[in-house]
Amino acid sequence: MTPARTAALTAAVLALLLAAGGARADSLRFCDVQKEPNATEQDALLRFSALVKDELAASGQDLALVSRSGLNLQRIGQRYSHAGISLKASANGPWSVRQLYYACDEKKPRIFDQGMAGFVLGTSDVAQAYVSLVFLPAEAGAELEAAALDDRRALALLGANYSANAYPFSLAFQNCNQWVAEMLAMAWGAAGDRADAQQWLQAQHYEPTNIQLGPLMLLGLFVPWVHSGDHPPADTGAGRYRVSMPASLEAFARERVPGATRVELCRSGARIVIHRGWTPIAEGCVAAEGDTELAL
């Protein structure tokens, strides 16, 4: 492997390890540090978030699984790093996103309702941003909405210990996307707690995302929100992590709920592309036949 390739892959691995649960990092503090968008960039992201809300409102649905791009994970095959549940009836405001995040000051995970603008602004790439929306048929959507809006049920699935690369079938740690997976189990499988949720997910053949890192897994030794002890020895021995990521949540919803639909939106500079369907938008936010392209 060339030095340039090694450096690029190392950066991507660190991006995964530091961003998978919403925590951001620099080399000193490992938390809550990101480039602030300037006024022009912020204005573009806010207008992009308004278009996302327009798409949500036009859907006729009351809920969507929502994912956003964060740090650049493309080198390890992941466009999205962070997912939540966008709720029309949120007490925080229409289409706020209920999600797990890591509270750096408190050093513990929390459940947080965040407006769509703040959710979109969470990307670290101010020049290019992606958002994915998955809409569910009426019965499945209503079941998930009832579970997600119930504070007691949402908090019942909040793990005590956070790890960006949490293994989905262990109670030791939890990341943001794993909380969403367990919410699906509570809504659709009547799970009462995390143990029930994980058993149901396994019984339903939920497949976490397979991240193959090889020797670069050693980088996790230097990151306080990355752990390997909850992962099966066969996985760590093979240099891989199996982790709940937005891609695995979307694949499970598509398989589990016939009739689920997907809309992907991206912004690159002053260009917006809206793509409908389960295939991804082309790299670089390029419109294909059938896509809608708008100018900010």
Image (cartoon, rainbow, N blue to C red):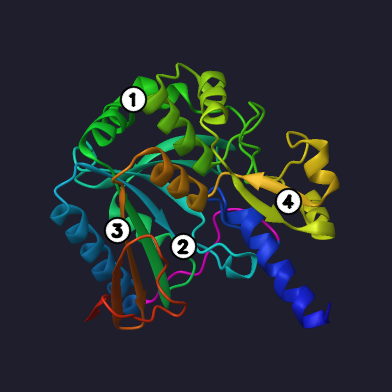
- The residue beneath circle 4 is 223
- For label 1, the crowd category at 10 Å Cα-Cα, with few meaning under 14, some 14 to 19 and many 20 or more, is few
Question: Does the residue at mark 1 contact the one at mark 4 (Cβ under 8 Å)?
Answer: no
Question: Does the residue at mark 1 contact the one at mark 2 (Cβ under 8 Å)?
Answer: no
Q: In this view, does 42 lie to the left or right of 16?
A: left
Relative height, residue 132 to residue 8 (above, below): above
Q: Which amino acid does label 2 sit on?
A: Ser
Confirm whether the magenta stretch covers residue 294: no
Tell me where residue 173 appears, x and y as whole percent.
64, 33
Q: Is residue 54 visible?
A: yes
Q: Which residue is drawn at 56% across and 23% down?
A: 199
Stretch of the chain drawn in magenta: 28-38
Q: What element carries label 2?
A: loop
Q: Which amino acid does label 3 sit on?
A: Ala
- The residue beneath circle 2 is 69
Say which mark, if any, is on residue 117.
Answer: 3
Q: What residue type is labelled 4?
A: Val
Say which mark, if any, is on residue 294.
Answer: none
Question: Does the residue at mark 3 contact the one at mark 1 (Cβ under 8 Å)?
Answer: no
Whichever of labels 1 and 2 marks the residue nearer the N terminus, that label is 2
Whichever of labels 2 and 3 marks the residue nearer the N terminus, that label is 2
Q: Residue at x 81, y 58 (%)?
A: 214
Q: Is mark 1 on a helix, strand or loop?
A: helix
- For label 3, the crowd category at 10 Å Cα-Cα, with few meaning under 14, some 14 to 19 and many 20 or more, is many
Q: How far apart are marks 3 and 1 (CA)?
A: 22 Å
Q: Which residue is drawn at 15% across and 53% down?
A: 57
Relative height, residue 292 to residue 27 (above, below): below
Q: In this view, does 154 lie to the left or right of 26?
A: left
Say which mark, if any, is on residue 151.
Answer: 1
Q: How far apart are marks 4 and 3 (CA)?
A: 29 Å
- Comparing labels 1 and 2, the label whose residue is closer to the camera: 2
Q: Is mark 3 on a helix, strand or loop?
A: helix
